[in-house]
Amino acid sequence: MNALTRFFARLEGPQTIGRGPGFWIGFLVVLTGACLYPQFSDGYTVGNTVYFFTWVFMALGLSLIWGYGGALSFGQTAFFGIAGYSYGILTINFGAAYGFTLVAVVLAVAIAALFAVLLGYFLFFGRISGVFLGIVTLSVTLVLERFMAQTAGPEWRIGSARLNGFNGMSNMPPLTIPWPGGDIVLFPDVQLYYVVLGLLVLVYLLLRILVNSSFGNVLVAIRENPERAEMLGYDIRKYQLGAFVIGAALAGLSGVLYTTWGQYITPSSMGMTAAALPIVWVAVGGRSDITSTLIGTLVVLSAFQALTIHGSQYALVVMGILLVLTVLIAPRGLILSGASRIGRLFGKRGDA
Amino acid sequence: MALLEARALNKHFGGLHVTNNVDLALEPGEIHCLIGPNGAGKSTLFRLILGEHQPSSGQILFGGEDITALKSYKRIRRGMSVKFQVPGIFKALSVRQNLEIAMQQHYPPAALHAEIDRLLDFLKLEGEAKQLAGNLSHGQKQWLEIGMAVSLKPRLLLLDEPTAGMSPDETRATGDMIQRLNADGMTVLAVEHDMAFVRQVAHKVTVLHLGQVFAQGTIDEIVADERVAAIYLGQSTPSTDAPEAAHA
């Protein structure tokens, strides 16, 4: 019991909203609902929900880098793309037998993280901050997109994997779990749903622990006043790099899951539009809180899809307006502002 | 042996010679005040000591070791700490969290919150623990930052205008606080304009003028020095510059 209380204590803190039995009972109710939901729905809708879930990892990563660490990065989709392509190249070459797709997931995320270490080192140890960080990360992302877009020729291949230029890479195997009596293939249906939901809960809880730890304390200190944080004896470059790499790895996880979901990845997943959308999801929900980011991302994504179906490209205009309105009306984010308002109404939880 | 020593320190910004061959030595346990008219190079000297600027030439020794090439955060870890001129606090975080961020490196988690409570008491901020630091009064913000700086248990505390914007009562209380810290063995280097404060706390005063050490001595020697009076507002003396000094 004592260990359990300590575990819950680490999940709560000044860096996350929601605490106490009330919040966690609500969390369990939502989780139970999410577990039962596929029983009452069809395969297509469940697969579509998985599609929404895959993006959330990238958004949570951006929340860590930008919302907590104060470094606005447009680089999330670059890591998304790198991991997606890496997964494709690895699995097209080595196949799906013996659970290799699972190894490929880990390798692809590691490759994205490694790239983030390299880029982040030059950014943070070169003391690039503020708007320049946004400009450099956006440039890197767009350069990657341009590069991948010109790989249409047959000479652009790694092993048996053709990069295929703007048409994108396809036909990589989906996630496959080796199982006695026949491998389990995770098509974007109920099976993949439970795996991604499990990952999402795990990442969410681990991030709660991370941001409420002493690491998280230093991260928000850097956001608030980098000079002061450094003059308390912290090597702030290492903390910024740490957050950047963790965030990038989460974007990589999104990229891999997206690629296995559709068995498809294209350069446009790193383009200007793609790079800007995570900013909208995270800002609208509330970037400085991971729960708000999670809810906000799912709400904005479903609204965006509904708009795309009915209004085509106007959906992007609506996203732009949404971002501007958020910045003007609720700079902390709509979900986060709403949550603190409700919290104040009920008194006790209001100091979040 | 001096705790802090600057040897022939020079700093140029383009053609501007902001720190000109400064020699300065701080004995352990002393409260040393740095005064001088605007533009005398006090802040630049501070930034050189902290490692925010690199000197064009010269050496800085701390505890007998050459720290001229060390990064700021490493100097802090060796036992320096600073309170900035503009309150350097984490405005959007609670007062308690501000102190937690400063102190978490020095105490095990089990003892941390009791230590924070003790420091809150010392700073007379116990009622404001849950308040956002940005909502504190100006004087409280200054104290909170002094608290954060002191919580590192530094050997040398650097204070850049610790009483700027404070009322005479707050200034007096700040002086008391610094004397209590000094009694526990903390060496202090303070840039300060308020002569009442300097008179209250300083063991030794260095006057900077045009980037050079202009005069050095006890406060009485400095006040009696007519050359010093001359660089402050023509013929008026520093003590008439700050009338409350007469009552100190």
Image: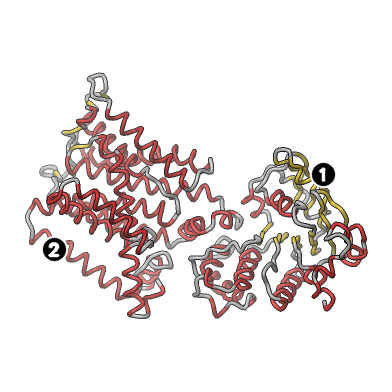
Residue B166 position, x and y percent, is 68, 72
Quarter holding the C terminus of chain B is: bottom right
A35 vs B223, nearest the viewer: B223
Rendered view: B125 above or below A242:
below
Residue B213 position, x and y percent, is 84, 51
Answer few, some or many: residues within 10 Å of disc 1's Cα (few below 14, many 20 plus, some between 14 and 19).
some
Quadrant of res A18: bottom left
Q: Residue drawn 56% across and 56% down?
A: A229
Q: CA distance from mark 1 to mark 2?
A: 76 Å
Q: Residue drawn 21% across and 32% down?
A: A168
Rendered view: A149 above or below A181:
above
Q: Is residue B139 left or right of residue A307?
A: right
Q: Identify which amino acid the numbered label 2 is placed on.
A: Leu
Q: Which residue is mark 2?
A: A36
Instruction: Residue at the far front: name it.
Output: B234
Residue A253 visible from this viewpoint: yes
A307 vs A9, nearest the viewer: A307
B80 vs A299, nearest the viewer: A299
Quarter holding the N terminus of chain B is: bottom right
Quadrant of res A290: bottom left
Please check whether the numbered discs 1 and 2 fall on a single chain: no
Q: Which residue is mark 1?
A: B21
Residue A101 position, x and y percent, is 23, 39
Query: Mark 1, chain letter?
Result: B
Residue A216 position, x and y percent, is 45, 58
Query: Mark 2, chain letter?
Result: A
Answer few, some or many: residues within 10 Å of disc 2's Cα (few below 14, many 20 plus, some between 14 and 19).
few
